[in-house]
Image (cartoon, rainbow, N blue to C red):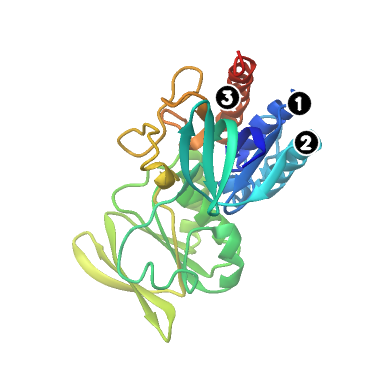
Amino acid sequence: MSDVRDVVMIGAGPSALAAAIYTTREDIDTVLYEKATIGGLAAITDVVDNYPGFPEGIEGLTLAGHLEKQAERFGAHIEFGEASNIRVEGKYKILTIDGQDVKAKAVLIATGSDYKKIGVPGEKEFYGRGVHYCATCDGAFYRDRKLAVVGGGNSALQEALFLTRYSSHIDLLVRSEIKASDVLQHDLQKYIDEGKVTVHLNTTTEEIVATDGRVSSVKVVEQGVPNEIVIDGIFVFVGLEPNTGFLKDTGVELDEVGLVKTNQHLETNLSGVFASGDVRSGATMQIASAVGEGAAAALSIREYLDGFDK
């Protein structure tokens, strides 16, 4: 606790890494704590096709790696650790990281979002044994196997398209109608025509069933009719939820869905505590905008630090 960091960033996804590039170039002492994967959800995205400057697209892991190396080149310290609390003591912010206190002049919350769960029997019990949330991480385990994909948005179709590289057949389970972009729907149609993908509209997932400890089928209600589909694994892509559980009793103001509220300078209601990227209320949930917000937050942090000792 004798050491005071200029800024501690919680999370090491694109937004925090971009912010770190800016702060460290200003010789602002910067440390980032990441509890899971450096690069966040971007790092486990197969191909990022809409990030400016890459006309052919870029692998998410590659993009995350570039951001990480650039931040470290300017002097950012990236460490693994999970934040569980933030409290304010005078002008300083005290963060609890893996049970230890870290003192900082400023804080950037950039914890992003995680995959939503559908909350049905078998989902939690068989996670990693047939239930998955990342096609690029786990798709290769299902070569020539039957899969189900739950969801009808952009992420669901993107991941389903990726899984066609491995799976012999995919059942796409859509609660209502497909809401993905026309481009993705057009790409999916080829696999529907080939018989490799079957789309089940107005279908709710009721239970994930396992045999001998591994997923073997999924119970659904399709168009009001119960059905059981034989599968070897299921991938769930039904949206994102913010990683803000650790802020529950900190005084940081959240909106109705748990996203962090900020002002026009990306500062929260707590002085010296900022937020950027997918965790921020009003964010567009795009990598390009998360990076831009990280840069903007860094400039606001610099201004805050300039007046810290005055």
9, above or below 81, in the image: above
In the picture of the structure, the residue carrying the numbered disc 1 is 27
In the picture of the structure, the residue carrying the numbered disc 2 is 75
Q: How many marks?
A: 3
Marks 1/2 in contact by CB < 8 Å: the verdict is: yes
Determine which quarter of the picture holds residue 63: top right
**Residue 175 placement (x, y as % from top left):** 30, 53
Residue lying furthest right: 73
Kind of residue at badge 1: Asp
Determine which quarter of the picture holds residue 225: bottom left
- Depth check, mark 3 against mark 2: the one in front is 2
As drawn, the label of residue 297 is: 3
83, above or below 25, in the image: below
> SS class of the residue under badge 2?
loop
Whole-number angstrom distance, CA of label 1 to CA of label 2: 8 Å
> SS class of the residue under badge 1?
loop
Disc nearer the start of the sequence (1/2): 1
**Would residue 276 be seen by someone viewing this image from the given angle?**
no
Disc nearer the start of the sequence (3/2): 2
Please identify the quadrant where the N terminus is shown: top right
> SS class of the residue under badge 3?
helix
- Mark 1 neighbour class, 10 Å CA radius: few under 14, some 14 to 19, many 20 or more: few
Disc nearer the start of the sequence (1/3): 1
Whole-number angstrom distance, CA of label 3 to CA of label 2: 18 Å
Kind of residue at badge 2: Gly
